[in-house]
Amino acid sequence: MPIVVLSGMNDESLAVNAVQHGAQDYMVKGSVDSDSLRRSLRYAIERKQIQESLRIKDRVIESSINPIAIADLQGKLTYVNHFFLKLWKYESVEGVAGRSIEEFWHRSAEALWIMERVLSHGSWRGQIRGRSKDDAELDLQLSAFIVKEKNGHGEPLCVVFSFVDITELTRLRRRLKTEQSFAGIVGYDVKMLQLFDTIRQVAEVDVPVLIQGESGTGKALVAAAIHNEGALSDKPFVPVNCAALPEDVLESELFGHVKGAFSEAASNKKGCFEQANGGTIFLDEVGAVPDAAQAKLLGVLQNGTFQRVGGEETIKVDLRVISATNKNLAEEVNAGRFRDDLFYRLCVVPIHLPPLRERLNDIPLLADYFRKKVLAQMGRDDIVLSAEAIDIMMEYDWPGNVRELENALQYALVGCRGNQLLPEHFPPNILKKTVPA
């Protein structure tokens, strides 16, 4: 039974003795107001509930070889085991007690989002990236769940986090550098190998992802890879090009409409969010979403609910949101063209795709990949890439990135009549920028 002592004796030695024997607090009559009494009683009850809920689990937690942490419902750490301290490079519990769990994540927004999901769904499992005391990155598998009072049927008491360290496995894969492509994305530059690791990581994590990069870098391919490599691969994947739709059409396309909502609405129509329910919606060029649709989009991300255009029924969906943009959304927020609250909801996990000019050593690999692809489509005999053609491609900046490279090779192969691709077969704009006058 939790104990709070209320006494008429203002005796310091008696108060110390009471606390040493297990009392939560010692309070003196006449100097106690209702708020402090209520607060003391609440703390005593909460402390006892947590102790009881973890009493049976203590032996399992302490004997576990995995790092374990326990946090209150606000995300503040109340307990960690020896292996948690060892993994995060702390010497004692005092160094971590009371700190927020988000401080141990590489991305605090991801930690906050996961905490929110655990509180609303009861548990969460996936791959995350942590950051140790010496600022080293840690690749981790995480299982998190809520502990409730009354054998799991009462109010939530705390959140338990169990980690598995897979850092060395991830680093080994990077050191081997055996991959040349992943999920349809071609490249063996170190930046691309890191991208492949990131895709594997976030594919298992049901968090919103924002993919940023210049036009033609392959943002849609990355979005599809994240969906296809995760647990939702057999569920719908619905892409929407927000920049390709007029403002008056975009809201109807995203959220649907009811019959008679506007002159062309001859019947009810499901929007992309309803079509993607249970799976993934990909919002390409999300920076082009107008203000009115931004507000409605924020509501879906916060509550999972929306209404069709012209409708009154509230529709609930459960899906993953992946978005992409070639704009710098942080700058768009600062300029007042994009809502900051929507940006933070979309950008729980940011992914940056490098432009082709920053991974030039991938150009020969990409060129060979597209050469084979185009020749198969054309039904042509084999045409080899000359050393001069590769030099031309390596010297060009490729402002249109991988998409421009593919188009240029297609142009060159169509115009090639021999069995070797030469510089003169490439589009004039590429030759003009690479060949000295």
Image (spheres, helix red, strand yellow):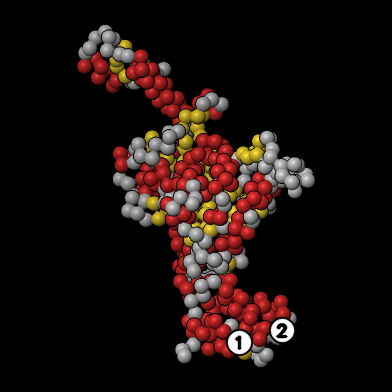
Crowding near the residue tagged with mark 1, few <14, some 14–19, many ≥20 C-alpha atoms within 10 Å: some
Q: What amino acid is at disc 1?
A: His
- Secondary structure of the residue carrying numbered label 1: helix
Q: Nearer the viewer, residue 101 or 53?
A: 101
Does residue 308 sit above or below 15 in this rendering?
below
In the image: residue 35, left or right of residue 422: left
Q: Nearer the viewer, residue 274 or 115?
A: 274
At horizontal 57% and vertical 38% (from top left) the residue drawn is 303
Does residue 290 sit above or below 401 in this rendering?
above
In the image: residue 430, left or right of residue 64: right
Q: Which mark is residue 425?
A: 1
Q: What amino acid is at disc 2?
A: Arg
Point out the tag, 1 or 2, that comes first from the N-terminus.
2
Front label number (1 vs 2): 1
At horizontal 53% and vertical 89% (from top left) the residue drawn is 388
Question: Residue 149 appears at what percent x and percent y?
Answer: 50, 26
At horizontal 54% and vertical 81% (from top left) the residue drawn is 429
Name of the residue lying farthest toward the front: 263
Crowding near the residue tagged with mark 2, few <14, some 14–19, many ≥20 C-alpha atoms within 10 Å: few
Residue on which disc 2 sits: 380
